[in-house]
Image: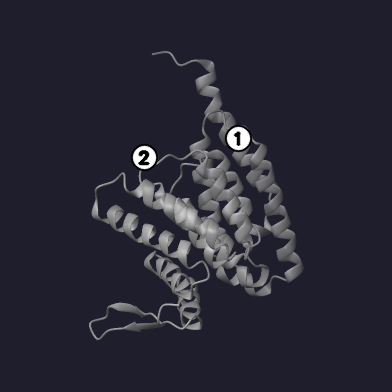
Amino acid sequence: MILSRQSILAPCVVCLCALTISWIQSPRLQKLLKNQQDISLATLEKDMQAEKLRLNLLKKTPSFGYDNLMANWVYLNFLQYFGDEEIRAKTGYSLSPEYFEVIIERDPRFLDVYISLSTSISLYAAMPERSIALMEKGLKSLKPLLPEKSYHVWRFKGIDELLFLGNAQAAQHSFATAASWASNYTDEDSKHIALTSLRTANFLKQNPNSKYAQISTWAMILNNQVDDTTRKRAISEIEKLGGKFITTPEGVARIMFPPKD
């Protein structure tokens, strides 16, 4: 079969654009992992400005139908950025939403990125408003059955709304929607999520300022595969709210709740 000139040139153009944008970023960015201790804060900030410029260019770069490829590539870039803990301790996580602006625009059905989005932007970058706004943007392209188990995004949104914005009414709607979407599935995990989400939604409707509901929501975070920093933050918040995190002799983690308020 003879391929058209467009089908041959399109992926080449995409690769060329990506390589060009990568070249634009400062070479220092590639040296950070080798000389982290010797790099000044001013140099790090300069490199972060270069990275922000690169991401802004990516937002405008044509993909010629290869949006999924672009989203995957930017997500890998984000994982490298987020995982560089020594540098992030100096510069913070302010670029996190910039990565996800590109990813959600290119591939809003890239379901696996949403937990990273919520954690990195709300917990680490302290920008829950942007996290929620990005999830709302992505949800416009999601349906109960497309992609599979997309109800998770509604749960992440409800968690951010309740824990970081204190918006119980918005969280109640998000958890109720998560329950509705999860009810379309028959596997045990989905049925459990449908039940717990519905319970949380109903409880918030009756008790919008409940510490019990907040502890339950932090427990949802612990049930996800989170890093050690997020785990410690969740346990700390649970204890501040009057709960206790214990590990049984059998090694099973449990949360003891205070009396319902």
User: Which label's residue is closer to the chain start, 1 or 2?
Assistant: 1
Q: Which residue is mark 1?
A: 16
Classed neighbour count for the residue bearing mark 1: other residues with Cα under 10 Å, few (<14), some (14–19), many (≥20): few
Front residue of 144/9: it is: 144
Mark 2 residue element: loop
In the image, residue 153 sits, relative to residue 236, either above or below, namely above
Classed neighbour count for the residue bearing mark 2: other residues with Cα under 10 Å, few (<14), some (14–19), many (≥20): few
In the image, residue 106 sits, relative to residue 100, either above or below, namely above
The residues bearing labels 1 and 2 have C-alpha atoms spaced at a distance of: 36 Å
Q: Seen in the image, is 51 located left or right of residue 192?
A: right
Image quarter of the N terminus: top left
**Residue 112 visible, this orientation:** no
In the image, what residue type sits under mark 2? Leu
In the image, residue 39 sits, relative to residue 138, either above or below, namely below
Q: Residue furthest front?
A: 206
In the image, what residue type sits under mark 1? Leu
Mark 1 residue element: helix
On the image, the x and y values in percent for residue 74 come to 55, 47
Front residue of 153/211: it is: 211
On the image, the x and y values in percent for residue 182 come to 34, 49
On the image, the x and y values in percent for residue 224 come to 39, 64
Q: Quadrant of residue 42?
A: bottom right
Front residue of 233/93: it is: 233
Front residue of 171/246: it is: 171
Residue 127 is tagged as none
Q: Quadrant of residue 249?
A: bottom left
Q: Residue furthest bottom?
A: 249
Q: Which residue is mark 2?
A: 145
